[in-house]
Image: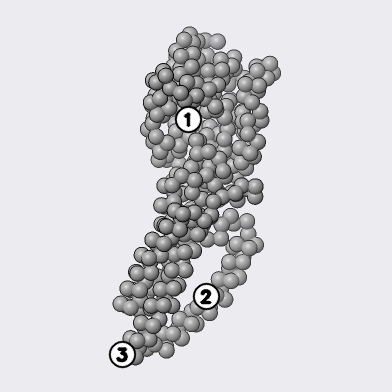
């Protein structure tokens, strides 16, 4: 994981036009398992020592941890699991524990009525207190989720870039984006590389949700600027929201459109030279991107390209994968390019086996 500090802002509300799966088979199975375990535990504790525990927050923590390992999980799915577990805890008290306490009270002189009175009073006061509190925190607030927020935030700390809206995988899944953004440690590497050359101007090809953009923008000194190119308007909208929450909007400019159309425009406008260029867009056009960005650099610039190794597929000349073939064309063009000194380095992490290409510009 990265060494990111946990001084992030809260996760943004999921856009109204994004539909997330809520009632899923895996959620029902997980909810049923948690319900059985918590119900059995509450029955045992209730009959053994006369105490039970609330299953809501523990269920939220367990559900977030387990569903977080699954692809495409989201907070709504977690809430269904949490609700099932909470209902199970209530049923265990009603069906098993209260009758057990009544029997204990008859047989062993247990102070049933005093205990029932204390519980009733606590329940009444709890409802009287929680109703206005919930209204203030949920109904009259822009809080994105009514339950499990604290538990989710605890699990998310440490896996986010400072100022980012959410952990990379979960943020992409909840926003409906493909989970192909850089990992936290890769983002940190990009920031270190940018700082190592004192980059003041950065060009990024492929924005997605703006996660790598935030890492790179935070590495800029005062007055530094980053230009990012994105094709998809939905991705651009989500990325802009993330930059705003990270307080980086003034450092970042976004150009919407096809990169192969935008790059010639940048050359014609005389933009650049850029100190660092990060290529993380569609792989079949990677070689074309390289050809264009060589017109936007100076000696000493770094050109970094992601997803080069493709789980080892880079060595498969007969691969039918368009992305693999695109990266083969890119690495061949990079090897033949006399104006740069380059290396492909492999990475292994939460996204599996892949790699970066890092090229140092020697001449233009």
* Label 3 residue SS: helix
Count how many numbered circles sit on residues in the image. Answer: 3
Q: Measure the alpha-carbon separation of dots 2 and 1.
A: 50 Å
Which tag is nearer the camera, tag 3 or tag 2? 3
* Label 1 residue SS: helix
Q: Is residue 139 above or below residue 71?
A: below
Q: Quadrant of residue 246?
A: top right
Q: Earlier in the sequence, mark 3 or mark 2?
A: 3
Q: Which residue is identified by label 2?
A: 126
Q: Earlier in the sequence, mark 2 or mark 1?
A: 2
Q: Which residue is identified by label 3?
A: 107
Q: Is residue 218 above or below residue 309?
A: below
Q: Measure the alpha-carbon separation of dots 1 and 3.
A: 70 Å
Q: Is residue 48 above or below residue 312?
A: below
Residue at 61% x, 41% y: name it: 238
Residue at 52% x, 34% y: name it: 212
* Label 2 residue SS: helix
What quarter of the picture does the C terminus occupy?
Answer: top right
Please provide percent x and percent y for residue 309.
42, 25
| Label number found at residue 190 | 1
């Amino acid at each position: 994981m990265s060494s990111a500090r946990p001084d992030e802002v809260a996760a943004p509300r999921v856009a109204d036009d994004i539909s997330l799966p809520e009632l899923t088979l895996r959620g029902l199975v997980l909810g049923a398992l948690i319900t059985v375990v918590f119900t059995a535990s509450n029955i045992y504790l209730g009959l053994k020592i006369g105490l039970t525990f609330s299953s809501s927050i523990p269920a939220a923590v367990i559900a977030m941890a387990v569903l977080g390992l699954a692809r495409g999980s989201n907070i709504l799915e977690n809430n269904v699991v949490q609700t099932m577990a909470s209902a199970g805890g209530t049923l265990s008290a009603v069906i098993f524990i209260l009758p057990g306490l009544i029997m204990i009270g008859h047989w062993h002189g247990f102070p049933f009525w005093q205990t029932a009175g204390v519980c009733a009073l606590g329940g009444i006061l709890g409802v009287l207190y929680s109703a206005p509190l919930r209204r203030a925190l949920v109904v009259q607030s822009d809080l994105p989720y009514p339950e499990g927020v604290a538990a989710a935030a605890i699990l998310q700390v440490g896996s986010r870039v400072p100022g980012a809206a959410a952990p990379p995988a979960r943020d992409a899944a909840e926003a409906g984006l493909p989970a192909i953004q850089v990992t936290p440690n890769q983002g940190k590497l990009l920031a270190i590389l940018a700082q190592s050359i004192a980059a003041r101007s950065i060009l990024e090809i492929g924005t997605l949700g703006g996660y790598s953009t935030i890492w790179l923008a935070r590495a800029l000194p005062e007055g530094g600027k980053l230009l990012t190119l994105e094709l998809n308007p939905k991705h651009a909208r989500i990325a802009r929201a993330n930059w705003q929450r990270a307080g980086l909007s003034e450092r970042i400019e976004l150009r919407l459109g096809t990169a192969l159309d935008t790059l010639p425009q940048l050359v014609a406008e005389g933009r650049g030279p850029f100190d660092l260029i990060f290529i993380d867009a569609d792989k079949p056009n990677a070689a074309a991107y390289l050809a264009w960005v060589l017109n936007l650099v100076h000696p000493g610039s770094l050109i970094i390209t992601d997803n080069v190794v493709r789980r080892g597929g880079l060595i498969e000349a007969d691969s039918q994968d368009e992305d693999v073939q695109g990266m083969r064309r890119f690495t061949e063009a990079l090897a033949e390019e006399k104006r740069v000194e380059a290396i492909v380095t492999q990475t292994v992490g939460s996204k599996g086996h892949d790699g970066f290409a890092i090229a140092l510009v020697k001449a233009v």
